[in-house]
Image (cartoon, grey):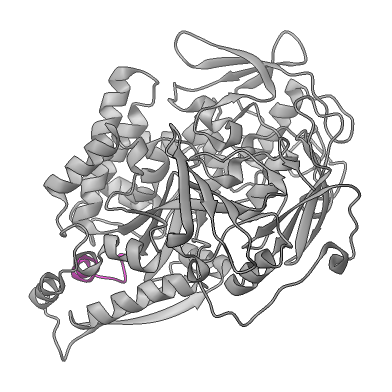
Amino acid sequence: MPDTNKLSRRRFLKATGGAATAAALAGCTGGDGDETTTTESGGDETTTATTTEEDTGTELSGSVFNRILSGTITTMDPVAATDTSSGILIQQVFDCLMSYPNALPTVENELAADYTVSDDFTTYTFQLADATYHNGETVTASDFIYAWERLAASSNSRRAYFILDSIGVEHETDDEGNYVPGSLGVEVGETETELVVNLSEPFHDTLEMFAYTSFAALPEGVLGDIEGYDGEMEYTEFASNNPIGAGPFEFAFWEQGTAAAVSKYDDYYGQVAQVDNVRWQVIEDDTARYNYAMNENADYFGLPTAQYDPGLVQVESTDEYGREIGKYGPVRNGKTLNYVGVPTLSIFYVGFNMEKVPKPVRQAFAYVLNQGQMVSEVFKGRGSPAQLFTPPTIFPGGAQAANDLIDSEYPYNADETDIQAAREVMEEAGYGEDNQFEVQWTQYNSNTWEEMASILRDQLASAHINMQIQKADFSTLLERGRNGQLEAYTLGWIADWPAPDNFLQLLNPPQTDTSKQGPISYVNWTAENGDAYQQATDAYQQVVNNPAPTDEAQQIRDEAYVDIETANWEDVAMLPIYNRKDETFWYDTVNIEPFGGMGPSRQKLNNVTLNR
């Protein structure tokens, strides 16, 4: 097969006219999105974490804003990062053309000082800000051309489909559909700080995509992993020890599995950081994170669900974005914390390898899963139950339209546990007391998700399903998924851009084949294992064929989005559980603006101030 991370999915889909062809080529495009697991999980209070800055052997000069990362960092390369922890640091070190200020889902200029758009929405011309990189070099249009060529062509890129497909920047492909290096429709304009971007056709969220850190500016030629460049440093040095961006913070250090830090860049073209340093302690154990925060080693943090008490939340105001702002406490150390609860654009779900888990079993899961019960009892109200894969705030017509569709068409009794229906669908398929179906449930190392799994396991036992629970670290879970080794699994998706197709691409059957390189999800949806396969395939094709930012195209996409959701209900490729409410807590030592619906990983920290 070709290197599918360099193949335009848009062109691939337009070239596949029917189910047979699409099935044969399924999975020949894609990459991984921000798939993540929830970090709000519990544990017994048996472990302490008291690592300080001095423990790492790396000193920071000046004020330090202390935070916690619940997952390991994997890279500082913007085109290679697919995990949230890496993205949090990359957001501080690198800048893009656009940004989401304080992670609100409305883009504003960043390195773009100004821009214009052609009448047909296919040519964007950007005037760049007068900015420099951390090495003192000036940011130019040529740097973006180089950085985006890496995004499209580097063997290190995990996001090529963002530029070749999602946005659809003009480019050439060879006879096998591979991207032809150097063919991107991006050029220097009339001056060295004017960037011209040509799209093959309009795309409704172009500016929103340009805010994603995969599109960040890099000094031209800093790496030699694309044609025409020898590189000024080795790749591992850049990705681990010396990333050079144009963001408000410079890279300070990263000690694998322990800690990382960034320091303010004094020559930043925008708001120079108010704190000298931001430091993250990496703590994957839930109880250790809690103890670290209660010992006041962190200024700003989340609370594991096991130690979270919803009765301690005192909401003082709710703003226009639905963010709840107030206080929490008193906590174990006697302090009352500042609090924000934000409904982020996210979905957490159970996915099924449809080749290994028959449809009646998947339907039985849907019948017994009571999303409302799980959110209330297991996740302690830290989110809202979900029957749709698209978050309600960006569903066509909004939350009310989402609720209306669920009320009228959801086939599995929303927020109810129907063991009888689950048993009946299994018995109709030939299963019984002496013929149970055995399924492996794989999840991240989270006690909270294991609690939910245990409830499902016990309920499914009455429906002739023997579910075995297995935990794995996040990277192992994703690797098994890509290799088609999972059966039932739990993951989450955080918005790359605020539109339904960013979520529903995971339910486009031709992109879910794990036997091909780079599946975007791991469900292996085919005509052989799903009656609604063709409905979902055709509907996503409609999305691809109508990408323009016009009312007419939007209406066609909206209808297709609904068709994909109902196809998923029919075949249960993925079973939505909840939309997360991200809750964050901080001591009075910090002044920080609440983050928005794009999630805390999208918030830059240059406006944070400290009171100590």
Question: Taking 470 as reference, is 554 above or below it?
Answer: above
For the residue pair 118 and 186, the one nearer the viewer reads as: 118
Residue occupying image coordinates x 74% and y 19%: 129
The image position of residue 365, as x and y in percent, is 24, 69
Residue occupying image coordinates x 68% and y 49%: 588
The image position of residue 473, as x and y in percent, is 56, 71
Question: Taking 88 as reference, is 425 above or below it?
Answer: below
The verdict on residue 172 being magenta is no
Kindly give the residue lying farthest to the bottom in the view shown.
434
Asked whether residue 438 appears in the rendered view, the answer is no
For the residue pair 425 and 451, the one nearer the viewer reads as: 451
Asked whether residue 186 appears in the rendered view, the answer is yes
Task: State left or right for residue 69 relative to residue 143.
Answer: left
The verdict on residue 360 being magenta is yes
Task: State left or right for residue 140 relative to residue 347.
Answer: right
For the residue pair 48 and 521, the one nearer the viewer reads as: 48
* Segment colored magenta: 354-365
Q: Count every numbered label the image shows and give the total.
A: 0
Residue occupying image coordinates x 20% and y 70%: 364
The image position of residue 17, as x and y in percent, is 28, 38
Task: State left or right for residue 288 relative to residue 528.
Answer: right
Residue 461: which quarter of the image?
A: bottom left
The image position of residue 14, as x and y in percent, is 36, 33
Question: Taking 464 as reference, is 263 above or below it?
Answer: above
Task: State left or right for residue 543 relative to residue 239.
Answer: left
